[in-house]
Image: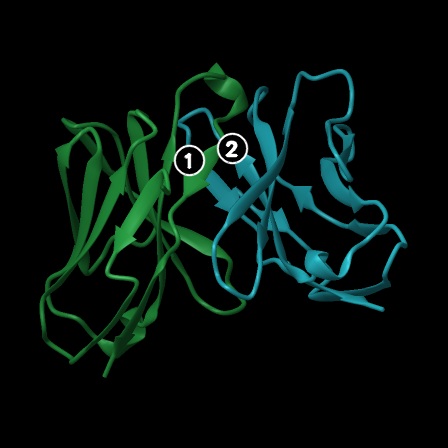
Amino acid sequence: AQKITQTQPGMFVQEKEAVTLDCTYDTSDPSYGLFWYKQPSSGEMIFLIYQGSYDQQNATEGRYSLNFQKARKSANLVISASQLGDSAMYFCARGSTLGRLYFGRGTQLTVWP
Amino acid sequence: DADVTQTPRNRITKTGKRIMLECSQTKGHDRMYWYRQDPGLGLRLIYYSFDVKDINKGEISDGYSVSRQAQAKFSLSLESAIPNQTALYFCATSDKNRGTQGETQYFGPGTRLLVL
């Protein structure tokens, strides 16, 4: 089974604080990619960050970083200095050799002032 | 202008009607996908296409069909809509540029479909 698990249905963080959104995955593929997407209340899916399974360093994109622990099969998203506009649903996804993505069920993040 | 567009953005239809959702992209990508999103279930793959002549079923293709009219266009049809097909539908595209380590997919704005 190509299972992606996001154990936190909802998370709350105060503005300017950091927050970690958890993601674990199953795979038997030796090579794969890990992705995080943001879905604000308007509904669109916004690509945030990518990590390749062979990448030696954790990916970073501005305030987003991906804490990749290959042996544990985890790919947690860290958002530093949270902003009110970060309030959204966040999806973790794993890429496959066939190009498709397998998505988790998402974590709803709420940033409060 | 958006790179991936979907029409219509919202649609209400009745049980048994045939409807088509359309997707167009200007990213020049070969690969296109259709997903549906239901509350609490994430996104699930309906169909995907690696080029005009290569179309594949995803995990929930029953009740749906697709047509890849050109590299830039990928349409999803519901032959006879039923209420449990009420969902948010996304089209996505990707470029084969990372080999086996996965490709970033870029999503359209989504189509909200309500089947009465």
Q: Where is residue B31? Give x, y as percent.
A: 31, 29
Could you classify mark 2 by the number of other residues whose Cα lies within 10 Å: few (under 14), some (14-19), or many (20 or more)?
many
Left or right of residue A93, residue A74 in this image = right
Left or right of residue A52, residue B57 in this image = left
Q: Give the mark, 2 or 1, whose residue is nearer the N terminus.
A: 2
Relative vertical location of residue A59 with respect to residue A38 in this rendering, above or below: above
Q: Which quadrant does the N terminus of chain B fall into? A: top left
Left or right of residue B102, residue A109 in this image = right
The residue that label 1 is drawn on is: A100
Q: Which quadrant does the C terminus of chain B fall into? A: bottom left
Chain under disc 1: A
Query: Is the residue at mark 2 from the same chain as the one at mark 1?
Result: yes
Residue at screen point 11% across, 69% down: B80
Could you classify mark 1 by the number of other residues whose Cα lies within 10 Å: few (under 14), some (14-19), or many (20 or more)?
many
Query: Which color scheme did the rendering employ for the protein?
Result: by chain
Chain identity for the colour green used in the image: B
Q: Where is residue B94? Give x, y as percent.
A: 39, 30
CB atoms at circles 2 and 1 under 8 Å apart? yes
Numbered circle sitting on residue A95: 2
Residue at screen point 60% across, 37% down: A35
Chain identity for the colour cyan used in the image: A
- SS at mark 2 in the image: strand
The amino acid sitting under disc 2 is: Gly
Q: Residue furthest bottom?
A: B116
**Relative to the observer, which residue lies in front, A110 or A74?**
A110
- Quarter-of-image position of residue A85: bottom right
- SS at mark 1 in the image: loop
The amino acid sitting under disc 1 is: Arg
Residue at screen point 67% across, 16% down: A54
Q: Residue furthest front?
A: B1
